[in-house]
Amino acid sequence: MTSRLPFSRRIVIAFVLMTMVVSGSFSLGIVAVVHFVEDQLITKELRGKLNMVLHEDIRAGREPRLDARTRFFASNSADHPIPERFADFPEGFTEIEEEDEAAYVFVLEANGARYMLLQDQREFEDREEILFSVVVAGFLLCIVLAWGLGVVMARQVMAPVARLAGQVRHPDQLDTRTAPLAPSYANDEIGHLAAAFDKTLGQLRRSIERERLFTSDVSHELRTPLMVISTSCELLLENPLQDGQREQVERIARAATDMNDLVRTFLLLARSGPAETAESATLAEVAREQAELWGPAIRAKGLDFELTDEGADTAGHNPTFLRTVMANLLRNALHYTAQGTVRLVLERDGFRVEDTGVGIPEKEQDRIFLPFVRGSEARGEGLGLGLSLVKRICEHSGWEIAAKSDLGTGTCFRIAFGAARTAEDQPATHRERWT
Ligand SMILES: Nc1ncnc2c1ncn2[C@@H]1O[C@H](COP(=O)(O)OP(=O)(O)OP(=O)(O)O)[C@@H](O)[C@H]1O
Ligand SMILES: [Mg+2]
C-alpha cells in the first residue's frame, strides 16, 4: 500500500514514524524511571520513619513524632487502631491513587502485630501529573517537528528528481541537438540516473533519426522510377493502341499517380514540423477527383455511390494528404460494404464517408486506428495500416477524425479540418449526429 504513495510523502511518513518510536520510547522510559525512583525513595523514607516511631517514640511511651502529612496506625494500639479499609493491605509499600485520596502506605509486621504509616502524597501526585503533561507535550512537539523536517527534507531530496523528470518529459529531448542531462547533476544516484537517461535517449534519438532518414531516402529515391513510369505511360497513350491495351496503360498510369501521391505523403510525414507545400486544393476538387476514381469501382460491386455537397467551403488544403485520407476511407467503405450505398458527404469544414456495410463492433472501435490492427470483419489482404496512416495525417494536419459505427448497419467516418471549432459553429445535422 505504502509503495503507491508519492516518494516525498513516504519520506515524511518515515520521519514521523521514526520520531514516534524514538521519542515514544524516551517518554515511556521517563515515566518508568519516575515510578521506580518514587517506589524506592518513599519505601526507604517510610521504613526509616516507622522504625523511628517504633524504637524511639512507642518504646519511650511518647506520641509518634510525625509531620502533619503522615499518620501512624498499629493493630495492638487502642489510640491508633488500623482503619478497617487498610486491614488487608499487604506488608511493604503500597500506593493509593483514588479520586479523593492519594497516599503511600507502608506496612510492617513484627512480634505478631501490624504497624502502618500512611503518608498523604497529593502534592507529589500533582507534580507528577505536570511532569507527565510535559512529557506528552514534548512527544507531540517532536512529532510535529519531525513532520516539518520531513517535508523540508523530502522537498530537498525530490527537487533534483522532479527537475530530471521535467527534462526527460520535455518534447525537445528527442531532438539530436539537445544537451546531455548528466553534466548538470552531482555524481550521485540522480547523476547516474541522468546518465542512464542520456544513454537511452541517445539510442532512441538515433533510431528515430535512422527511421526518418530511411523513410525520406526511400520516398525520395522512388520518385525517379515513378516519374519514368508516368512519362512512359503518357508517351504510350499518345500512340494508337487497341482498346484493351489502352485500358491497361491507363491503369498503370493511375497506379503510378497513386504511388507518387503515397511517396509524397510519406515524405511529408517523415519531415518534422508542419508540411509546407506550395500546392493547395479545395475539398470539392479533391472529392470530385476521388469520386471519379472510386465511383466506378464501387458501382462495379453493385453498390450505389453518392457524392453530396452540404456546403463545402473553398479553403485550400494539402492535396496529397487530403487525397490519401479520402482514398483510404473510400477504399475501406468499398471493402467492408456488401450491399447498399457508399456516400461521400462534403461539409462546410470537413467531410464524411458513410457506408451501409458490416460495421465495426464497439469494442474494436478504439483500436482500429492503431497500426497493424485489423478488425474481426477484415476483408482481403490488407495489413491494417490504412486507418493508422489516416490518423497520423490528421494529427499532422490538425484535423480531427471520428468514427461511428453500428454492427450490421454501417459506418461513418468524419474528418473535421478546424479542430478548434466549437459545437455551436457546426451545422445542426453534425451536432445531432456527433455530439
Ligand atoms: N468502413 C468500414 N466498415 C467496417 N469496418 C471497417 C471500416 N473501415 C475500417 N474497418 C475496420 O477497421 C480495420 C482497420 O482498417 P484499416 O484500413 O486500418 O486496415 P485494413 O483495411 O484492414 O487494411 P489496409 O487498410 O492496411 O489494407 C479493418 O480491418 C476493419 O475491420
Ligand atoms: Mg483499409
Image: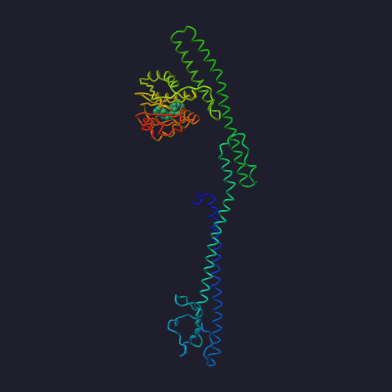
Q: In the rendered view, how is the structure colored?
A: rainbow
> In the image, what residue occupies the spot 59% across and 37% down?
201
In the image, 62 versus 75, the foreground residue is 62
Residue at the extreme bottom of the image, as rendered: 61
- Quarter of image, res 53: bottom right
Above or below residue 151? Residue 305 is above
- Quarter of image, res 362: top left
**In the rendering, at what x and y percent does residue 44 appear?**
56, 80
Q: Which quadrant holds the C terminus?
A: top left
**In the rendering, at what x and y percent does residue 105 appear?**
49, 80
Above or below residue 294? Residue 367 is below
> In the image, what residue occupies the spot 54% across and 88% down?
65
Instruction: Please indicate whether residue 46 sits to the left or right of residue 342 in the image.
Output: right
In the image, 159 versus 349, the foreground residue is 349
**In the rendering, at what x and y percent does residue 154 appear?**
57, 52
Instruction: Please indicate whether residue 435 sits to the left or right of residue 196 in the image.
Output: left
In the image, 170 versus 338, the foreground residue is 170
